Amino acid sequence: MLTLTNVQIVYDNTIEAVREASLALGPQQIVALLGANGAGKSTTLKAISGVLYPEDGEVKGGQITFEGQPLAGMTPDRIVRAGIVMVPEGRRLFDQLTVEENLLMGGYTRSVAESRLGLERVYATFPRLTPKRAIVSGYLSGGEQQMVAIGRALMSAPKLLMLDEPTLGLAPQICDEIFTIVTRLCRQDGVSILLVEQNAQMALSIADTGYIMENGRVVLDGPADKMLRNEDVREFYLGFGEGGSRKNMRDVKHYKRRKRWLS
């Protein structure tokens, strides 16, 4: 469905943010893309969405294809129409617009009838938004704003939904609710999910496949359940060392010096 092959992304023609990154995502799959801040995860999502240009970023090498068609040269609106939608980090709602107005902005590529059906789908997916449809989104809680952001993306009926840190800054109970909904969108509604998430254990617990990026490169990938048992993943991303003892952050930072996954 989605394939990245040896992708290189450069900013300002000088800074290599992603190098030779490859990954694949199939229909009705959840793929978790993990890594520390600055590893290249968000840049990868922006490249797929075609929105690197505001930051002077460019795909310099490799290929990104979706359903067999290359995305190179496609405008962001054409990529949305092809079925790929991203929910960016930080939600980025129109704070002065109501919940429903924000949702309708997500359906700009759809007809009026399709937008009405989209609203029904979003309110069914996020019932707590129904009584707040006329409330200005800036007054919502962080969790409710994240639901609006995901709902806005669903308005275009995506085949592939890309989520960039969907649980950032949210309470654990809300995180659980968001991940339950994301899982249902894939397993029941057939939407493929590419998930960038700092909570590695939660992400891998719902994913089919995981990829770990470091310094712009994919350094480890495999079935999510296997990665949850991987000693290095447990130590440096789940916070457990040998024997299940929790390590402190100073111990975890030792990872930066070991580089055991790099060739």
Image (cartoon, rainbow, N blue to C red):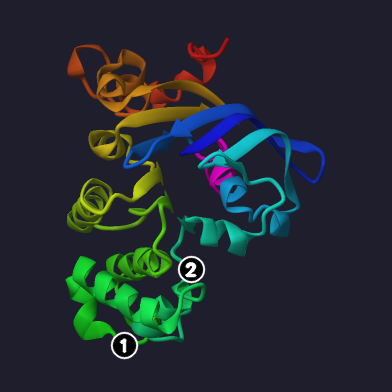
At x 45% / y 74%, what residue is drawn? 107
- Does residue 215 appear anywhere in the picture? no
**Residue 7 x/y as whole percent:** 64, 32
Residue at mark 2: 92
At x 20% / y 70%, what residue is drawn? 124
Q: CA distance from mark 1 to mark 2?
A: 16 Å
Q: Secondary structure at mark 2?
A: loop
At x 29% / y 58%, what residue is drawn? 170
The residue lying furthest to the bottom in this view is 134
Q: Do the CB atoms of the residues marked 1 and 2 lie less than 8 Å apart?
A: no
The residue lying furthest to the right in this view is 13
Q: Nearer the viewer, residue 11 or 86?
A: 86
The region drawn magenta spans 37-45
Q: Is residue 40 magenta?
A: yes
Residue 242 circle label: none
Q: Nearer the viewer, residue 92 or 168?
A: 92
**Residue 51 x/y as whole percent:** 64, 56
